[in-house]
Image (tube, helix red, strand yellow):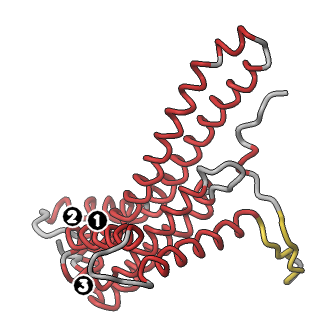
Amino acid sequence: MAIDPIKQFEIKEILSLGEIGGADIALTNSGLFMILTTAAVTAFLMLATSGRTLVPSRWQSIAELCYEFVAKMLRDAAGTEGMRFFPFVFSLFMFVLFANLFGMFPYFFTVTSHIVVTFALAMLVISTVIIYGCMKHGFGFLKLFAPEGVPAPILPMVVVIEVISFLSRPVSLSVRLFANMLAGHITLKVFASFVVSMSALGFAGWLGAILPLTMTVAMTALEFLVSFLQAYVFAVLTCMYLNDALHPSH
């Protein structure tokens, strides 16, 4: 029987929590792994910082590297003023990174392979940008859609383009993460299924399975790299969008 590469993304109910307004409320595998991801990030940071020393341990070194990595990213994109958003960006980066890495383990669930999760994270980012931008600058936040130095005759067209570009940000931010994780896991599952199918054909099948097995190992290594890169891309784009809230006229 062929192995369905899509089956790994199915949402399954684990525990029913009753009904509210006629809607079923339940803990699903997606919800469970979001809880586990949050717990894993919390446990890692608590473990790494519980015994801080001048000469850091391995765990403390990793935590400090993560801290400096995100802090430098935020300072480069939004300046020193952007550091007020450090807890927000750091939390997003660590959550996406751990969620991506969790998905690499057999029988685990990849929560970032679902558009509803990534879109919720993207809307959280854009909502923060809009709310903070309006609170800090008032109507001055609208300068974001009317760049300085644009000639008056083409200003209306530029404003329309800027508005469309801004509204497309949560879509592009969420689809980029979702699509990369979905496509990578499907490809990995397809190559792994080739190994299983060909191995059932005897000695000739074992020889033929060498190539897909090699591809599976290579794809696994690539997916670990993609897991980090997608967390980085999500975080760095968040920093760039937050810069618009801090400096809308730039």
Between the C-alphas of marks 2 and 1, the distance is 6 Å
Q: Is residue 140 above or below residue 186?
A: below
1 and 3 marks in contact (CB < 8 Å): no
Residue 159 location, quadrant: bottom left
Q: In front of the other: label 3 or label 2?
A: 3
Depth order, front residue of 65/141: 65
Q: Amino acid at mark 3?
A: Gly
Which residue type carries mark 1? Val
Q: CA distance from mark 3 to mark 2?
A: 17 Å
On the image, numbered disc 2 is attached to which residue? 155
The x and y percentages for residue 73 are: 27, 67
Q: Residues within 10 Å of mark 1 (few under 14, many from 20)?
A: some
Residue at 55% from the left image edge and 53% from the top image edge: 178
* Residue in the picture at 57% in, 41% down: 183
Question: Which residue corresponds to mark 3?
Answer: 140
**Which quarter of the rendered picture does the C terminus lie within?**
bottom left
Figure label count: 3
186 or 145, which lies in front?
Answer: 186
* CB within 8 Å, label 3 to label 2: no
Residue 157 position (above or below residue 53)? above
In this rendering, the label closer to the viewer, 1 or 3: 3
Secondary structure state at the residue bearing disc 1: helix
Task: Kindly check if marks 2 and 1 are in contact, taking CB atoms under 8 A apart as contact.
Answer: yes
| Disc number placed over residue 231 in the picture, else none | none
Relative to residue 38, is residue 49 drawn left or right? Answer: left
Q: Position of residue 70 (x, y in %)?
A: 32, 69
Local packing at callout 2 (Cα closer than 10 Å; few below 14, some 14-19, many 20+) is some
For label 1, the residue is 159
